[in-house]
Amino acid sequence: MERDAHLIAPEVARRIRIVGLDVDGVMTDGGIYLGSVGESKHEFKRYDIQDGIGVHFLKRAGLYVAFVTGRVSESVRMRARELEVDDVAQDDSAQKLPAFLKILQRHGLQPADAAFIGDDFPDMPLLKIVALPVAVGNAVAEVRAVCSLRLTRTGGAGAVREFAELLLKARGEWKAVSDAYVAERSAPKAHA
């Protein structure tokens, strides 16, 4: 991955203050499991652990992280809570742009301060306005065409982690963030 460190210009990387993530097809592989137990309907999604660590690293570097999805799902709320994601916008009509602009406004940011990772047509309005538009490895051709960064990893299989590493290396923060993570987990825990 070291050869890819220059895919993001350092001046662009340092400008980024918030990373927006689509969920279905970026944080997940895009598959949705639907079922019911009695009268209760359930939806399940599979999330990648490495992507979760990528989100953790972005937040540790002081960046805001937002989930912006065109579905409403308890699974998304649960994963966002686990990862301490700053903002979650779920719109069942897939109108992501107004929600994302509201998130930016809440943090006093502009699209020029943002990166967004997407995979399909509902992400296009956001990808067209942010400073760093990013496509996962399995994004549709039209999305890949408008993105300045095209990841090799696919949605739900490490793409967010790949992006976090590329961005933080371009910012000169990767080693400090990853070393701090390992150090936290290397110290023995005090038992009560």
Image (cartoon, rainbow, N blue to C red):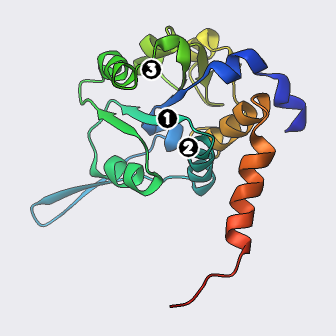
Q: Quadrant of residue 135?
A: top right
Number of the label disc, if any, that sits on residue 123 = 3
At horizontal 36% and vertical 32% (from top left) the residue drawn is 69
Q: Position of residue 152 (x, y in %)?
A: 73, 33
Q: Amino acid at mark 1?
A: Tyr
Task: Check disc 2 and report the residue beneath it.
Answer: 59
Identify the mark nearer the N-term, 3 or 2: 2
Report helix, strand or loop for mark 1.
Answer: strand
Is residue 33 in sight in this rendering?
no
**Relative side of 171 to 189, left or right:** right
Image quadrant occupied by the N terminus: top right
Amino acid on which disc 2 is placed:
Lys
Residue 40 visible somewhere in the drawing: yes
Q: Are marks 1 and 2 in contact (CB under 8 Å)?
A: yes
Name the amino acid, label 3: Asp
Does residue 35 appear left or right of residue 7 in this picture?
Answer: left
Identify the residue under disc 1.
64
Cα–Cα gap, marks 3 and 2: 22 Å
